[in-house]
Amino acid sequence: MTQQNAALVEQSSAAAHSMSEQAGRLAEAVAMFRVEGGAAQPT
């Protein structure tokens, strides 16, 4: 049981790290869509 818990903790840690990296890349991608004033302008 302890080995299973350790494996789950390791998997959770790896998933959290991966999600953190993905969130950073998403923030960079979204940043290119920002406009002055922080609101989208009607087209």
Image: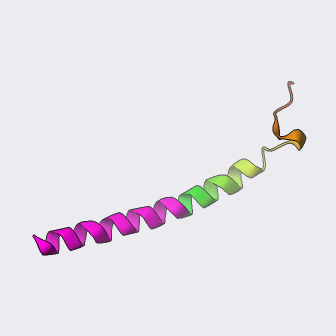
Q: Position of residue 26 (x, y in %)?
A: 62, 53
Which quarter of the image is occupied by the N terminus?
bottom left
Q: Is residue 42 above or below residue 18?
A: above
Q: Residue 41's quadrant in the figure?
A: top right
Position of residue 40 in the picture relative to residue 15 (left or right): right
Judge from the rendering whether residue 25 lies leftward or rightward of residue 8; answer left or right.
right
In the image, residue 42 above or below residue 36? above
Check the picture and name the quadrant holding the C terminus: top right
Q: Tell me which secondary structure the magenta stretch mostly adopts.
A: helix
**What is the total number of numbered labels drawn onto the structure image?**
0
Q: Is residue 43 above or below residue 32?
A: above
Left or right of 19, for residue 24: right
Asked if residue 40 is among those painted magenta in the image, a careful observer would answer: no
Depth check, front residue: 2 or 20: 2
Q: Nearer the viewer, residue 11 or 43?
A: 11
Please state the extent of the stretch shown in magenta in the rendering: 1-20
Residue visible at 22% across and 73% down in the picture: 6
Q: Which residue is rendered at x = 85% and y = 24% of the image?
A: 42
Q: Would residue 16 be counted in the magenta stretch? A: yes
- Classify residue 3 by image quadrant: bottom left
| Residue 14 screen position, x and y as percent | 39, 68
